[in-house]
């Protein structure tokens, strides 16, 4: 074979190799583009699914009033009337003055430091507190003072607003009805359920509460000062959580009450009996 024939064959082979290489590159590029298109399609589908899920969540939150799934009890409804009746059965007829529930001359005083949004306070309020009220407060042997201490409420201004709303009800000697209703209808923690509408709704459920006076009293500086004074008292006692308690003979320095349970009143009963014996 001549030298020129060999060179022609090598040239043909080189051209063939280039064509095959070009085809392979085009095929790889097409496969990459197809894979990319498929990936974009999956992402689009995923985005649609996420959007649908978000929309469903938004609808649920709107339907539940944005309260973390906790259904609000609207004043005037059967549920609201039943709750108000239960609260009135517990504290109705007991003397009240401001933050105090019970006979002003009761020999023993229990100071209850709480945050209205605190779920553990709700546990106590619906657990050990009712039998304590029945056994000791209604018989005139114990009076309870409710004091404010911010723990569960994340926004200081919201805490101040809600606690002052309760104190304002106390100006009409109905603070304990407001407190009990709040704890009974407490929403999910950190869900932002405490709004002006929520507070107004609670006030409307308190029997005999003048809404006009309650609204005006909320702007009184003395109530804001009371919240600050409670915080200082809690700090002096070394309290960092709620609920926390001080107990003592009325008119004498109070001491920290150590409790074993917030649903069983036994440890509270023992402390009260001990101070009554003194």
Image (tube, rainbow, N blue to C red):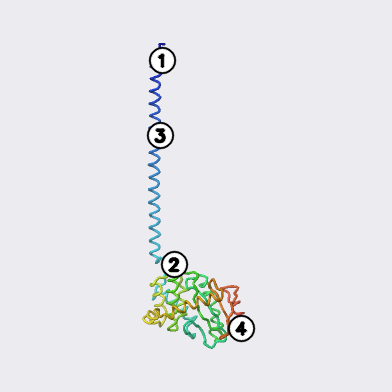
Q: In this view, does 16 lie to the left or right of 232?
A: left
First in sequence, mark 2 or 4: give its number. 2
The secondary structure type at the circle numbered 2 is: loop
Tell me whether the residue at label 3 lies in contact with that at label 1, contact meaning CB atoms closer than 8 angstroms: no
Tell me whether the residue at label 2 lies in contact with that at label 4, contact meaning CB atoms closer than 8 angstroms: no
Disc 1 from disc 4: Cα separation: 118 Å
Disc 1 from disc 2: Cα separation: 88 Å
Give coordinates of residue 44: x percent, y percent: 38, 48
Residue drawn 39% across the image and 23% down it: 16
- Mark nearest the camera among 2 and 4 is 4
Residue 253, above or below 186: below
Residue drawn 58% across the image and 74% down it: 264
Tell me whether the residue at label 2 lies in contact with that at label 3, contact meaning CB atoms closer than 8 angstroms: no
First in sequence, mark 4 or 3: give its number. 3
How would you rate the neighbour count of disc 2 (Cα within 10 Å): few for under 14, some for 14-19, many for 20 or more?
Answer: some
* Residue named by callout 3: 28
Residues 219 and 63: in front is 219
* Residue named by callout 1: 6
Disc 2 from disc 4: Cα separation: 40 Å
* Residue named by callout 2: 70
* Residue named by callout 4: 275
């Amino acid at each position: 074979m001549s030298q020129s024939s060999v060179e022609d064959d090598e040239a043909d082979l080189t051209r063939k190799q280039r064509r095959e290489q070009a085809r392979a590159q085009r095929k790889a590029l097409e496969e990459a583009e197809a894979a990319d298109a498929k990936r974009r399609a999956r992402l689009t589908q995923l985005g649609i699914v996420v959007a649908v899920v978000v929309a469903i969540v938004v609808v649920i939150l709107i339907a539940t009033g944005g309260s973390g799934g906790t259904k609000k009890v609207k004043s005037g409804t059967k549920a609201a009337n039943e709750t108000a009746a239960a609260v009135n059965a517990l504290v109705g007829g007991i003397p009240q003055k401001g933050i105090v529930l019970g006979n002003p001359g009761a020999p023993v005083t229990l100071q209850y430091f709480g945050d209205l949004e605190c779920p553990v306070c709700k546990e106590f309020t619906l657990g050990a507190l009712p039998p304590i009220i029945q056994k000791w407060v209604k018989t005139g042997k114990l009076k309870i003072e409710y004091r404010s201490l911010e723990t569960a409420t994340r926004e200081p201004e919201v805490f101040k607003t809600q606690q002052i709303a309760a104190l304002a009800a106390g100006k009409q000697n109905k603070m304990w009805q407001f407190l009990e209703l709040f704890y009974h209808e407490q929403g999910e923690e950190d869900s932002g359920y405490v709004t002006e509408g929520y507070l107004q709704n609670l006030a409307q459920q308190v029997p005999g509460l003048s809404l006009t006076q309650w609204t005006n009293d909320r702007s009184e500086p003395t109530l804001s000062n009371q919240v600050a004074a409670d915080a200082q008292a809690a700090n002096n006692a070394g309290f960092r959580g709620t609920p926390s308690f001080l107990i003592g003979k009325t008119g004498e320095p109070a001491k920290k009450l150590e409790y074993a349970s917030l649903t069983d009143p036994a440890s509270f009963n023992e402390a009260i009996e001990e101070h009554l014996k003194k």
